[in-house]
Image (cartoon, rainbow, N blue to C red):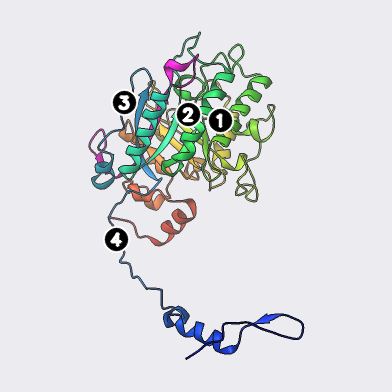
Amino acid sequence: MGFNLTPNRDHRGRSWFPFNFWAAILALLPVGSFAVGQDFATNTYTSSTEDFANPERGFYIQADSYASAPSTVPPNLASYRTYGRSSPDNTYTAKIALLLRVFYPDTFVNAPISASFLSAMQADFDSIRAQGCKAVVRFAYNQDQTSPFAEPTKPRILAHIEQLKPLLKQNSDVIAVLQQGFIGAWGEGYYTDIFYTGGQATAQNWLDRTEMLNALLAALPTERMIQVRTPQMKQKLVYDPTASPASAPLSPSAAFTGSGPARIGFHNDCYLADGTDMGGGTSAQDISNLRNRGARHPTNLPTAPAPASRGTAQPRSKHATFGKSDRRIFCPYLETPRFSETVFPILCRTTDFAREPLRSSDFLPRGLAERSRQKRPARR
């Protein structure tokens, strides 16, 4: 059979192929390509009560690494993810797929981060990836609570962030979220002589903090988010240095734009520690405003409480101020508690679920959590 592969031309000079050419082409194509549904399969799943390590959700453990004494990622993360890890008081076992990795470039306060420490951090991310886990990442320089603090200048911090940018982008697949860090003891933003003036943040101090936060946002892919230590750190960026704790959160229409403010969530390292989450002199009204703001925070953004054990104050889990706003805060992850009495009240659950033990697989995005509450029967 012969085919005419020379295009014909019409009276306007336009080219076209004869019918027998297209018929030959169609004949050579697999029949299944034109059969609707041929390439699809139906999978039927059976419901299960098995606990599992929910990606970017659930309990986490913390492991720090110092430039002055680098340490590797725990080699048993994969085991914790598969088999679980017992709580400190052995009251429950949690499947863990998250590691809070705090990097301390403590020997580079006045110098660029060395190539060897950058390589050590890359090795950490490689290990986290190989073990099927993800990391909550933070950078800090010290744990000093007395001035003068061993901290770098703002230009040095910005230079360090620029050095870290390729590392963060290259490993964004295993970074669940980046915490702001860099400023103050533990990277929590408080104990600092560079970003405070006389123990208080001036308008210029807030502008400096905002500049650093914008640099961190630029150092990550737009699909990755950043957590700040307090809602005020976000409010000052969204509005201006005069923004009060009563400033409104982002609207739902602004929360999914991918802008800088739409990528900022919170981490509360003293959640439930006492009646003010160890607010440190913040007024009761400000605490109430900030707590309610957290409850109205857009649900696409991560809000991560970590129960604190510092001090001797009565935990707020047993405190009168533990109220409805706490139960409206949906957190993607939670530190393996340092004291067991915080485990059950922290869960932000409805009364029907208050008696249940928490499981790693219970940490869901808010919409899924709402549907789960409505449909899932209580476990006995």
Pick whichever of labels 1 and 2 is earlier in the sequence: 2
Residue 240 appears left or right of 158: right
Q: Earlier in the sequence, mark 2 or mark 4?
A: 4
Q: Which mark is residue 71?
A: 3
Q: Quadrant of the C terminus?
A: bottom left
Report which residue position mark 1 lands on.
287
Q: Quadrant of residue 336?
A: top left
Place residue 210 in its image quadrant. top right
Q: In the rendering, at what x and y percent does residue 331 appear? A: 45, 43
* Amino acid type shown at disc 2: Asp
Q: Point out the frontmost of discs 3 and 4.
A: 3
Distance between the alpha carbons at the discs numbered 1 and 2: 9 Å
Q: Is residue 134 above or below residue 101?
A: below
- Residue under circle 4? 48
- Residues at discs 2 and 4 in contact (Cβ within 8 Å): no
Say which element carries label 1. Answer: helix
User: Circle 4 sits in a helix, a strand or a loop, which is it?
Assistant: loop
Q: Residues within 10 Å of mark 1 (few under 14, many from 20)?
A: some
- Residue identifier under label 2: 277
The number of numbered discs placed on residues in the rendered structure image is 4
How many residues crowd around disc 4 within 10 Å: few (fewer than 14), some, or many (20 or more)?
few
In front here: 339 or 108?
Answer: 108
Disc on res. 8: none
Q: Is residue 97 magenta?
A: yes
Question: Mark 3 or mark 2: which is in front?
Answer: 3
Q: Which residues are magenta?
A: 85-113
